[in-house]
Image (spheres, helix red, strand yellow):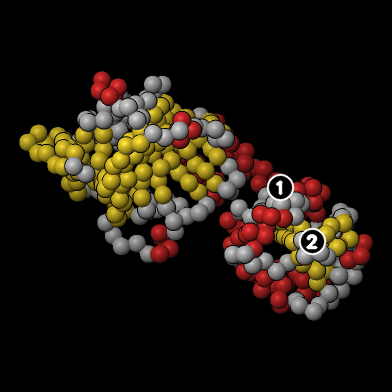
Amino acid sequence: MKKLSIVFLFLLVSTNLVSQWKYSNAKNIKDDVVITYDVVYDRVLSEKQKKLSYFKKEIIVIFNKDKLLEKRYSNSKNYDFSTLLDYDKELTYSLARSYTTKTGIINKFKNPVKDVILQEEEIENIIGIPCQVYETKIKGEIRKVYTTKKFGLRYIKQFNAQGFLLKYTANDKYLGPYTVTAKKIYYTKLPAKTYSLEGYTIRTTEEQKQYVIDAKKHSNERKEQALERLGELSPKYSVRSIQGNKFKSKDLIGKVVVLNFWFTTCPPCKKELPHLNKLKEKFKGKDVVFIAIALDDEYKIDTFLKRNPFNYDIVEDGRWIAEKFDVKAYPSNIIIDKKGNYQFYKIGYKSNITEAMSYTIEKYLKD
């Protein structure tokens, strides 16, 4: 839920930072233009900071005469952030993609909020293109903003300038000031789907706020329901793992059963695998059965396991089992005691989850 709020905050801020228009020479853009930008932070960042979702490693801007797509790259594998600008409709789509969702906030182009002063006598070349130079203040310091009118589009983010940004400084609330500089440009013909919103759920700002509120409510309800299950009899099931082992719930009475629900493209699922492997090794030779219910088909699991060992017995295409256990979020870990009753039901990844699981397993092995 915390991550969902971060995504919403990013989308909201991103929506408010963008304002662009067309110039008459935009019609001269025949193909697509791709510009790659370097991002350099004023201060030295730690490796931990560089893994944050809002760290920017590189920015790529792709545009034609009608649309512009700004893609921001980081070291985080959990989220992908971008902004799509529709110049004909003067609409901005601030987009966030995670391993499970593709969400966008729609807004109209807005007037820029950051004042700048044109340095009329100053011209600077960026990637071989003459740029007009503006000055502005970022965190109390004078910084320069470089734009060109070569392309016919007004791409100036929060700066009240004219032209198309090729170099500028901005400030991140957590990581401080950073400078973005165009380093490469090329012209090509890209497919129309480059600018597509297919698969994205588009909401207004108000709709997104309500969605976050509702999602938090539903998350809390799921956790409460999981707690209510403790001590209840678990569902009956019969499965066969890709390793060839068959498991029936009635045959597992007298053993502690540990279930993990996951899928191969789920980053937090992948993150907890080494911990789960250690957990299984700890109880090797004891009356504990470890079964992983995957949503994927076997061929995807096999490819995944070549790089990411997972030592549980793995069941493929297990969505029907997830439904039986009422699992709606991933990863989820469940422990069933020797009598077939729920004794542990946790949703989501936590760094110390296997410590709690180990305690529960030991407790119910004694019964």
The structure residue drawn at horizontal position 82% and vertical position 49%, both measured from the top left corner, is 324
Q: Horizontal placement of 7 versus 37: left or right?
A: right
Residue 241 is marked as 2
The structure residue drawn at horizontal position 77% and vertical position 71%, both measured from the top left corner, is 361
The structure residue drawn at horizontal position 47% and vertical position 55%, both measured from the top left corner, is 76
Q: Horizontal placement of 328 versus 352: left or right?
A: right
Which residue type carries mark 2?
Ser
For label 1, the crowd category at 10 Å Cα-Cα, with few meaning under 14, some 14 to 19 and many 20 or more, is some
Quarter of the image where one finds residue 130: top left
The answer to which of marks 1 and 2 sits earlier in the sequence is: 2
Relative to the observer, which residue lies in front, 286 or 312? 312
Relative to the observer, which residue lies in front, 289 or 142? 289
From the top left corner, tell me how far across and down residue 284 is, in percent: 76, 77
Counting every numbered tag in the picture gives: 2
Quarter of the image where one finds residue 350: bottom right
From the top left corner, tell me how far across and down residue 165 is, in percent: 26, 38
Residue farthest toward the left in the current orientation of the protein? 121
The residue that mark 1 highlights is 328
Q: Horizontal placement of 250 versus 215: left or right?
A: right
The structure residue drawn at horizontal position 67% and vertical position 70%, both measured from the top left corner, is 277
Residue farthest toward the bottom in the current orientation of the protein? 285
Secondary structure under the numbered disc 1 in the rendered image = loop
Residue 143 is marked as none
Secondary structure under the numbered disc 2 in the rendered image = loop
Alpha-carbon span between mark 1 and mark 2: 21 Å
